[in-house]
Image (tube, rainbow, N blue to C red):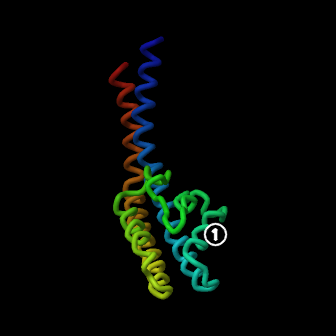
């Protein structure tokens, strides 16, 4: 009885780690796509209403469609605390580096430069999304299959 439970638990753990990798790849793609659209939206909003970047970030943080991007809920003055984001589990250092450089320099921008950099950041995140999506398509079935087969292999070996 205990041996059977141990086998099932071990097989489940092997499956879990493979499927967790697939989940993180899917989540990263979704977040990159949302980041691309949010920076495009911010550029359009600032351009249309001529508001400050802080007001634009506050507007975005209240929008239900971008609620998952909790980066924008950490607006403190003109600073945005990206380090406390729940997205740290899904995004890579490269993904964050674009955002960090943008937020560090955005206080010094005039309106036209700010809009141009917002649009450039949107394009960068869209390119990252396409690259991540291609990788996801390429590796999703492999990770899923290997995790399930690994779990079955553990069951067979331990029986």
Q: Residue at x 42, y 57 (%)?
A: 91
Check disc 1 and report its element: helix, strand or loop.
helix
The image quarter containing residue 158 is: top left
Residue closer to the observer: 134 or 35: 35
Residue farthest to the top?
1
- For the image, the number of numbered tags is 1
Q: Position of residue 16 (x, y in %)?
A: 44, 37
Residue located beneath label 1 in the image: 59
Q: Position of residue 55 (x, y in %)?
A: 61, 72
Q: Is residue 93 above or below residue 155?
A: below
Q: Position of residue 12 (x, y in %)?
A: 45, 31
User: How many residues crowd around disc 1 within 10 Å: few (fewer than 14), some, or many (20 or more)?
Assistant: some
The image quarter containing residue 69 is: bottom right
Q: Position of residue 97 (x, y in %)?
A: 36, 65
Which quadrant is the C terminus positioned in? top left
Q: Is residue 3 above or below residue 35?
A: above
Residue farthest to the bottom?
112
Q: In the figure, is residue 15 to the left or right of 157?
A: right
Q: Residue at x 47, y 18 (%)?
A: 5
Q: In the figure, is residue 77 to the left or right of 147?
A: right
Q: Residue at x 58, y 81 (%)?
A: 46
Q: Is residue 2 above or below residue 107?
A: above
The image quarter containing residue 153 is: top left
Q: Residue at x 61, y 84 (%)?
A: 50
Residue closer to the observer: 153 or 79: 79
Residue farthest to the front?
77
């Amino acid at each position: 009885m205990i041996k059977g439970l141990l086998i099932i638990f071990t097989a489940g753990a092997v499956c879990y780690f493979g499927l967790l990798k697939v989940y993180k790849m899917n989540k990263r793609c979704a977040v990159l796509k949302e980041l691309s659209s949010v920076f495009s939206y911010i550029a359009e909003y600032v351009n249309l209403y001529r508001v400050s970047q802080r007001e634009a970030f506050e507007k975005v943080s209240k929008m239900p469609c971008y609620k998952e991007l909790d980066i924008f809920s950490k607006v403190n003055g003109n600073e945005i605390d990206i380090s406390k984001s729940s997205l740290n589990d899904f995004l890579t250092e490269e993904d964050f580096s674009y955002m960090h450089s943008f937020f560090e320099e955005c206080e010094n921008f005039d309106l036209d430069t700010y809009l141009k950099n917002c649009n450039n950041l949107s394009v960068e995140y869209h390119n990252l999304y396409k690259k991540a999506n291609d990788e996801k398509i390429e590796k999703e079935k492999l990770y899923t299959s290997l995790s399930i087969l690994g779990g079955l292999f553990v069951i067979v070996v331990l029986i």
